[in-house]
Image (tube, coloured by chain):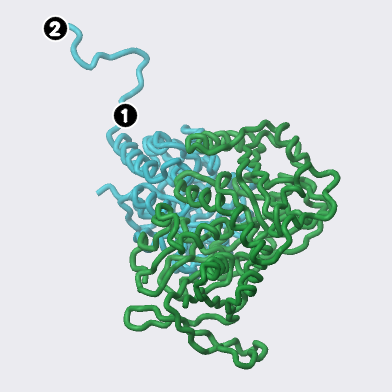
Amino acid sequence: MDDLIIAGEKFSSRLIMGTGGAPSLEVLDQALAASGTELTTVAMRRLDPAARGSVLDVLRERGIKVLPNTAGCFTAGDAVLTARLAREALGTAWVKLEVIADERTLLPDPIETFDAAERLVADGFTVLPYIGDDPALARRLEQAGCAAVMPLGAPIGSGLGIRNPHNIELIVEAAGVPVILDAGIGTASDAALAMELGCDAVLLATAVTRAQRPDVMATAMREAVRAGRLARQAGRIPRRRYAEASSPMTP
Amino acid sequence: MDVVVGGGVVGLSIAWRLARAGRPVTVVDPAPASGASHAAAGMLAPVSEVTYTEEPLLRLGVASLRRWPAFAADLTADAGLTPAAGPAAGPAAGPAGVSAAVRDGLDLRAQGTLDVAFGADDLAALGELAAFMEKLGLPVERLTGRECRRLEPMLAPSVRGGLLAPGDAWVDPRRVTAALLAALERRAVPLVRAGVSELLRDGGRVTGVRLAPPPEDHPAAPEGSEQGDEIRAERVILAAGAWSAGLADVPVRPVKGQIMRLRSPVPLLSRCVRGMVHGAPVYLVPRGDGELVVGATQEELGFDTRVTAGGLYELLRDARELVPGVTELEVAEVVAGLRPGTPDNLPIIGPGAAPGLVLATGHYRGGVLMAPLTAAILQGEEGDLASLCSPARFRDIS
């Protein structure tokens, strides 16, 4: 089996979903089902894990593992606190670490992120940090003990795809932990490209939840991630400037 | 006799319509008109709120909006309100027609909703929304930034464009619930100020409600009070909003909304204005008396009604992007209410699985808009739309 393994835990789906932006819980539920995801991230700020009928119930019902995230945090202090509250409330030591630098771009703050990652790793968390497409930072976070690295393709919710495929390749090349392409996916070809570049998984939300038909887009993403993974494993042909006949030209 | 559990805009509307039809009815609520109806802004804006996947909600909203003028006129008459109770002196600087449009004591107004965009991204998103609305045959008008500001001069100069939904309206929900309570009193409908601890059941049938004893620190209940007692009924109509799931197995959850009321000596706006700021929707609703309602957060925090610093900050930050002048206004009030959310955002209206139980809950963000339609559905009208709201769509409803 070609499983995704993060911190020793196996997932047969390489599509990780987020829950933000869905018009209703039912639409979200159908999209999650269609996506085939086994791991889904949930923003813990402004969410009461004990409340009945929330998004967490939707995930529990589907047997999807919850990956709490620290979206909305601007400092390492906020992020560490949010992660601890999530661990207490949900009983999971996994956290998608997200410390943003400003509201306009929602780009991750590398220094606060690294600071929080160090503290959370020391505190026994399984840390999956959301970062820019920076190979040096990715390596440092791996050395600091993070269980995966999650470089962005483009800013959150922008749907701009993978703006710097070269950097993603560099991160993949050097990484000893799973690389999860996070943020920026706009459509299925973006997800396929991430996998072709060698990413171990793709995390997306808006591309599905704000699509005109979220369940159909979720299916497209599931297929795209599978296709990209297979293409990566199959090994693409080299690019050539001129044609090369695939069958003999002369009898 | 029917018992309506819940004295918000939905429960009171149902009770009033039943009473008008000559049916004996009693309303039970520990604090009528104090929950989501008290917090609500009162937008009757099914068109400007439409999003992908929510066409059924649009159909319900449009149908209920169509009922609002007659509903308001009947209610105004029944409650003994003076029609056309607009502001005594019309706003000198405001656009013409504002006070003229206050058609009754409910501050029902129908100048439409203006949805505005600032950056290029927001404008493109608004363009997509417009295309979607046109596909659905909705009457919307695309405006340039300058056209938006001609309609609403207090809008920020950076506005790039907008969408006018001319048919959308709004009403003051507090005036509506006050009028409903007055109308019920005039029709001698009993209002029992008590909580309901459980539904009475006989075999499979719901036969009434058991009233909750008053809380310990509550001032002594009036003599002859029925508190702690039971009320028997042929039908129990559950209209308890976010609290409905505590009494019957309905998939309703509380969704917290913080909302702010500002006061202005001169109305800043003549119609409802909405916009997206940092991807979060914000709206401003002007009232005839100079009040400006700014809403609203959406938070999944259970039965939490605390007003928070972050909530207020976000409301004001976003409102100021739309209308810079709001920071000059007096803060009149900040409250948090609990919307009754459902998994598909549609209300749950119709017979429950147990005989004797009728559900009228889960109106989420649209209780004020949907109240007339809900009351009509419970009187057997609107069969087509009723099927969209049927409780049968969820399993295990009892």
Where residue B204 is drawn, which disc sits there?
none
Q: In the rendering, what colour is chain A? A: cyan
Query: Of B266 and B10, which appears nearest the observer?
Result: B10
The chain to which mark 2 is attached is A
B316 vs A191, left or right, is: right
In percent of width and height, residue A213 lies at: 41, 42
B269 vs A53, left or right, is: right
In percent of width and height, residue B377 lies at: 46, 60
In percent of width and height, residue A13 lies at: 33, 49
According to the picture, the residue beneath numbered tag 2 turns out to be: A251
Can residue A110 be seen in this snapshot?
no
Number of numbered labels in the structure image: 2
Q: Residue at x 33, y 53 (%)?
A: A11
Q: Which residue is drawn at 53% across and 48% down?
A: B62
Query: Of A33 and B34, which appears nearest the observer?
Result: B34
Residue A156 occupies which quadrant of the picture? top right
